[in-house]
Image (cartoon, helix red, strand yellow):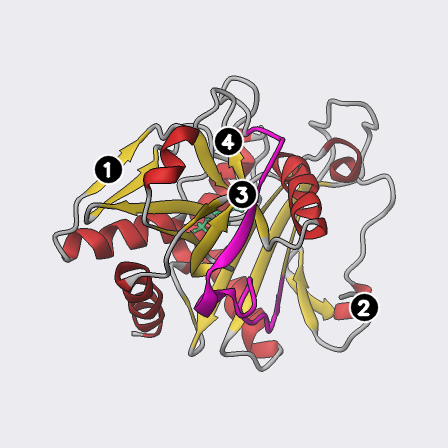
Amino acid sequence: YDDRDGKIWMDGELIDWRAANVHILTHALHYASSVFEGERAYNGVIFKGREHSERLRTSAQLLDFEIPWTVDEIDAAKQQVLQANGLTDAYVRAVAWRGVGEDMGVASRKNPVRMAVAAWEWGAYYGDAKMKGAKLDIARWKRPSPETAPSQAKAAGLYMICTMSKHEAEAKGCSDAMMFDYRGYVAEATGANIFFVKDGEVHTPKPDCFLNGLTRQTVIGMLQERQVKVVERHIEPSELESFEQCWLTGTAAEVTPVGKIGDYNFEVGALAKDMVTSYEALVRA
Ligand code: PMP
């Protein structure tokens, strides 16, 4: 991803893609003082762009740092990046972190806060699983308690267990892993929220120790418009057997049906398909 043409916005200016580098003593690299956003532009417009910019600032505040750019400025930076790279349909990655400064210890109040925005073309996150249903492994890592980590922050440090879980899943031929939370309830996938269907109702884990995704909120709204009952609650592992359909939601994943989690099978049913196509239509509307 580093050796290519293009422009990246970094600390207020557009620079060459290859020049968008940081020093090895960057605080974030050592202590995970970094937050980010994943966004998608459709027809040149970032879906919920403003909400993503707000979440980036909030994530930083949860990690005790302030991004020196307003929501408007962050929105403008993202548009500049899309334009400079001639992109209309793209994935947009904004990232903010503690840079190099006086501190090389755990504390980093004096280190400057840095920010960058890059964008590139990125197709279906789970490849052809969108039609067939993704296969998920069951992760051995658990989403931590909100007393252990700032679980509402989209913070780099929270992804360490996601990367490990996803690697194990892929080694077993799966597309992703479903994670339980610290209490043993069903939580989410490594980069997407999860939904289940049973008897015409939709059940989804209560986001009390993981990201309440913007896509998740959008899909709940779409279901409610259809008068489908959505129950946000704690879901026990033993219930997986009784669910008929399942899908994941996320900016990168969009809506992706799930065909299998561990030994449990799900059909790519009518409601799952409806959510896939209706979400596609909505983001382009
Ligand atoms: N959970 C995790 C761990 C994620 O990385 C993402 C993707 N940002 C989500 C959930 C879904 O969030 P959103 O719909 O806002 O992209």
**Upstream in the sequence, badge 2 or badge 3?**
2
The residue that appears at 62% across and 78% down in the rendered structure is 85
Comparing labels 1 and 3, the label whose residue is closer to the camera: 3
- The answer to whether any part of residue 113 appears in the image is no
Helix, strand or loop status at disc 2: helix
**Residue on which disc 3 sits:** 262
From mark 2 to mark 1, how far is it between C-alphas?
Answer: 47 Å
Q: Which residues, given as a range, are shown in magenta?
A: 118-142
**Upstream in the sequence, badge 2 or badge 4?**
2
Q: Where, quadrant-wise, is the C terminus in this rendering?
A: bottom left
Comparing labels 2 and 1, the label whose residue is closer to the camera: 1
From mark 1 to mark 4, how far is it between C-alphas?
Answer: 18 Å
Labels in figure, total: 4
Residue type at mark 2: give it.
Arg
Residue 27 at what x, y percent from top left? 77, 35
Which dot marks residue 231? 1
Q: Are marks 2 and 4 in contact (CB under 8 Å)?
A: no
Residue type at mark 3: give it.
Gly
Residue 76 at what x, y percent from top left? 49, 64
